[in-house]
Amino acid sequence: MAEHSIAGAGRVMAADGDRSARARFVIALLCLALALSVFLSLTSGASDASAVRVIRDWFTSTMPADAALAARDRLIVYDIRMPRVLLGVLIGSALAVCGAVMQGLFRNPLADPGLIGVSAGSSLGAVAIIVVGTTWLAPVTLALGTLALPLAAFFGGLAVTLLLYAIATRQGRTSVATMLLAGIAISALAMALTGILIFMADDRQLRDLTFWQLGSLAGATWPKIGTIGPVILLALSAMPFLSRGLNALALGEATAGHLGIPVQRLKYTAIVGVSAAVGASVAVSGGIGFIGIVVPHVLRLAIGPDNRYLLPASALLGASLLLIADAVARTIVAPAELPIGIVTAVAGAPFFLWILLRKRGVVDL
Amino acid sequence: MIEARDITVAIGGKRIVSHVDFAARPGEVTALVGPNGSGKTTLLKALTRELAYTGTVTLNGRDLSVMKPVEAATLRAVLPQATTLSFPFTVREIVRLGLIGGRSGVLPGEDARLPERALARVDLDGFVGRFYQELSGGEQQRVQLARVLCQVWAPVLEGRPRYLFLDEPVSSLDIKHQLIIMDTARDFARRGGGVVAILHDLNLTAMYANRIFVLHGGQLAAAGSPADVLNDELIESVFDCRLKVGALPAANMPFVLPQSAA
């Protein structure tokens, strides 16, 4: 019944070319999906701790029968699963929204924050802390403690973005094409420097590095969320103001300007917002691929490319998918844990190829 | 009134337009003509601030260079030669983009219906639900024109005339739609707006333009009414073709002029 009415609604919407009602419906569904994913993530894991029990105890404030067990469960749910779920929501939505914004900005459905070197810059910062954090950069590491790694990754990404922006901006105009090409060059340079550091690393560092690069939400703690949460939330809260401008940009920069969009300010805001959010994400979770490409792409097929709906829908779907991927990552080989980057790549890459092959005629790449 | 004085545009050190004076009045269709590479599009891009220029451009007496994008967008809409699209938008979604920054000038409640009305104006009734990428080149150009019309739907807003800049609006259209589009442009002018159009068809130009600016090698070669400007000498010197204005072909040679439209 529900299936039928959705399909029916889709046909009617398509007939008059207005997909906004359908988009709102999909966003409502995605809210539900995110709530389910959060519940699933809180209740599943390597331990048999019951989130339901913890929540019930909390609400009824009765003394549980087995106090020791209840305390252990509380610890697992409050201090391990909850920060992890929150981190998954933050990073999943950041990666998906940043992907959608980059694609709008570069007018290319294959664009991704990885493309302009933000991720490579963040990696360089993180690898530097892992490898030379106890020698050359010892004062930094001592001063910042566990925050040294995320902060280094964040500033690495930001430094690359600002450098790129300086290179690509002439007389107040930022050339998106120059930025893309310079991004490839600077990515290569950052990766070469990362390579030198890896060459210098010892065996234990190499293992740390490899796991960090594969990506994981395992390092989730409340202090880390306190560090990157505000950055990501601030960047994401700027995005709704970009959606109209990004829609106009689909017609080209000149036409967007003729439509009254302050194009230069739009580009600046989008680039800074994306590098902040991606830098913060890479900083705590390493490289998690495909969320930024697959999520906006799938949603464009469902609700169309209108960024007013695409951006919030991407945030919701990105968060849900990352939570599900994380649930898989930490249960499939329990009590060990798979890096989440492997899960998203294994699931995302074939799916992406399938979309490309199926829609080749319609989506002009 | 659009007034441009001493406009010079250089791209990569090469001067494309030099020292051109230009004016377009509300209530008129002003045509820019000239051979390929004569600087028509470059001049139009300077007048719409898409390219950096030296000289001054004023729109209704206000200096264009100090206007905010949204101010300029309420005074004029621009139709580019071609628009490629990177995402699968429907026709309605494209036309609706015309309402983003400018002010259509219709009552607030009527904005939602404007895409249909604009599409009807360019003879694309019933196209709202189609995907833009699935349309032919001529249909796409008319969808873009509908979008541009939405942006400045009322030719006069709060007593101030508004303008349409059209870069080769009919170059990819069949003869019926050339006439429909040029009629739309003339109607916009008759209701108090101004139209600046780059045209290649000299017959259409003669039929629809109130004033013609002829560019040649980046400089103004002539300006005036069609009757004043279009003569044998100008055609030969500017277009490098020895053609006779107003000469009829041989009796057995068919020819079809837009002027013969009933």
Image (spheres, grey):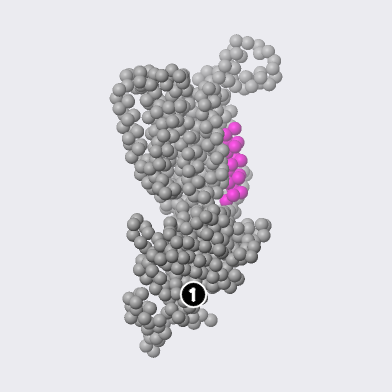
| Residue A191 vertical position relative to residue B47 in the rendered view, above or below | above
* Residue B235 lies in the magenta-colored region: no
Q: What's the magenta region? A: A19-35
| Residue B219 horizontal/vertical position (percent) | 38, 69
Element under label 1?
A: strand
| Residue A7 horizontal/vertical position (percent) | 57, 48
Instruction: Give left or right: position of B11 versus B136.
Output: left
Give the quarter of the image for residue B124.
bottom right
Q: Residue at x 59, y 40 (%)?
A: A29
| Residue B101 vertical position relative to residue B58 in the rendered view, above or below | above
Name the amino acid, label 1: Arg
| Residue B133 horizontal/vertical position (percent) | 46, 57
- Residue A326 appears in the figure: yes
* Residue A23 lies in the magenta-colored region: yes
Q: Residue at x 59, y 49 (%)?
A: A20
- Residue B93 appears in the figure: no
Q: Residue at x 42, y 52 (%)?
A: A364
Name the foreground residue: A272 vs B25: B25
What subunit carries mark 1?
Answer: B
